[in-house]
Image (spheres, grey):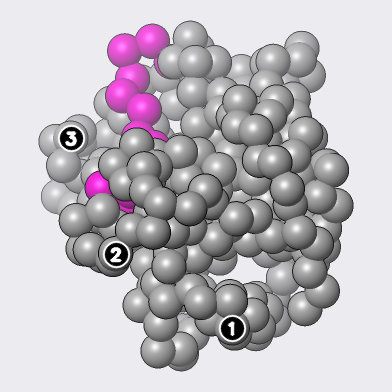
Amino acid sequence: MIGIVDWGIGGIGFLQELRKRRPRADILYFSDTGATPYGRLARAALGARLAAVVAALAARGVTHLAVACNAASTVLPKVGWSMPTTGVIEHGSRFALATGARSFGVVGGVRTIRSGAYRRALAGPGRRIRQRVAQPLSALIEAGDVGSPELRGEVRRIVAPLRDVDALVLGCTHYPAIAPLFGELLKGVKLIDPAAAMADWVDQRWPLADGGSPPAFLTSGDPRAMRLAARRAFGEELGRVERVVL
């Protein structure tokens, strides 16, 4: 069974991409909104939290883990569990480089940008990388806001210095929910959705038996808020969401 972990509902976009490729895959999605946002946790605390999440998911039958959260993916090289695991940053970087672009914009949360993970992965002779912290976009999208004047104003401010890049990496899995707005404000710039690249990789590298059951959803936060946010941001009807305490 494939486990998908994100602090919130951004990973729903990855879930949708994976189900396009593997419609009968056994999937367990975990949203950790009952915990401190991952981008605010110290590195050691985030690693410990992820280890607790992995243990809980393994107890429910998860054998492979997709970390659909850029903030959490910044600590993956330092964590140590035996479950096969992949994080979204490596796939976003690979996808971006494959475009042949020479100048990249990266938008993401504070931890993602300050980690330098995308900058290091994209660096090379003749390449130019410009990064922008994109708070508070994830919080607005997590609340189901994909088009308010406040959100549009924030996106316009964030991307203003990025109008001359060749490609823009959406360094938070919430951001594809407002991809049309990025496209509107950055005409001609290629948008890089790391979740789609990770879904391709998982489909090709993890040939697990598919049971055909609908995805199951867990959260450490408010199930009702999770269902509402997933519907508003990604048009996904989650059905039953089980609340768990770690």
Q: CA distance from mark 1 to mark 2?
A: 19 Å
In the picture, the disc for residue 209 is 2
**Is 187 included in the stretch rendered in magenta?**
yes
Q: Position of residue 132 (x, y in %)?
A: 54, 40
Which of the marked residues, 2 or 3, is nearer the chain's N terminus? 3
> Which quadrant would the N terminus be assigned to in this image?
bottom left
Residue 155 to residue 31: above or below: above
> Which quadrant would the C terminus be assigned to in this image?
bottom right
Look at 32% across and 46% down and name the residue there: 22
Residue 174 to residue 186: above or below: below
Which of the marked residues, 1 or 2, is nearer the chain's N terminus? 1
The magenta-colored residue range is 186-200
Q: Position of residue 57 (x, y in %)?
A: 58, 75
Look at 46% across and 38% down and name the residue there: 16
Density class for disc 2 (Cα within 10 Å; few <14, some 14-19, many ≥20) is few
Which of the marked residues, 1 or 3, is nearer the chain's N terminus? 1
